[in-house]
Amino acid sequence: MSSNPPVYAIIRIRGTVNTPYDVEYTLRLLRLHKKYHCVIYPSNLPGLQGMLEKVKDWVTWGEIDRETLIQLLKARGRIPGGKKLTDDYVDSKFNELGVKGGIPALADAILSGKIMLHKVDNLIKPVFRLHPPRGGFKRTIKKPITQGGETGYRGPAINELIKKML
């Protein structure tokens, strides 16, 4: 297997009420303007770890796998204009970037680090709007995972949460 750094899915799970200015500013930099918005960033992006540490009480994040990323792109991927992301669109627009094979090929390119969604936002919207999780959260949102809550780093368990929110 390749030694590519993992790709993080970051989901905002708390709203805007009583959010300190510096945290709100960092959330805007991450493009997490609203509750239940999700973004995808490579874990080795400069400054990302510090930003996640700053907003850890408002977001949850972890390593997204290929299967979940494909489902996310198919269900919630949007192109400029708000239309759904399709295999035909990926083949026509991402061809010059070396992506052939539709949404699964785009997911592979994202996971390998060849394409970063925040750099190609003129081809695909980098923010995925999700539903609240089916069945709700099992614990309180305001505490970190280490204290029995929902916020903070959750590792591969992020995939289960994303599937509940599609």
Image (spheres, rainbow, N blue to C red):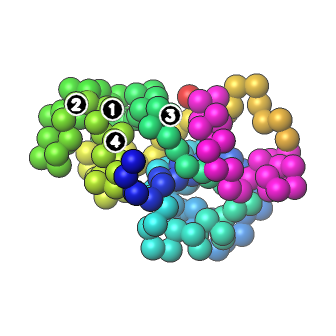
**Quadrant of res 153:** bottom right
- Badge 1 density bin: few <14, some 14–19, many ≥20, Cα 10 Å: many
Mark 2 sits on what residue?
A: 101
Q: Secondary structure at mark 2?
A: loop
Q: Amino acid at mark 3?
A: Thr
Could you say which is closer to the camera, residue 17 or residue 119? 119
Mark 4 sits on what residue?
A: 108
Q: Are marks 2 and 1 in contact (CB under 8 Å)?
A: yes
Who's the residue at 79% across and 52% down the image?
145
Who's the residue at 64% across and 34% down the image?
160
Q: Secondary structure at mark 4?
A: helix
> Of label 4 and label 3, which has the lower sequence position?
3
> Of label 2 and label 4, which has the lower sequence position?
2
Distance Cα–Cα, label 2 vs label 1: 7 Å
Magenta residues? 140-164
Mark 3 sits on what residue?
A: 68
Image height check: is 30 above or below 161?
Answer: below
Q: Position of residue 149 (x, y in %)?
A: 83, 49
Q: Are marks 1 and 4 in contact (CB under 8 Å)?
A: yes
Mark 1 sits on what residue?
A: 104
Does the magenta portion include 144? yes
Distance Cα–Cα, label 3 vs label 1: 11 Å
Q: Position of residue 71 (x, y in %)?
A: 46, 29
Q: Amino acid at mark 4?
A: Asp
Could you say which is closer to the camera, residue 143 or residue 157? 157
Distance Cα–Cα, label 4 vs label 3: 12 Å
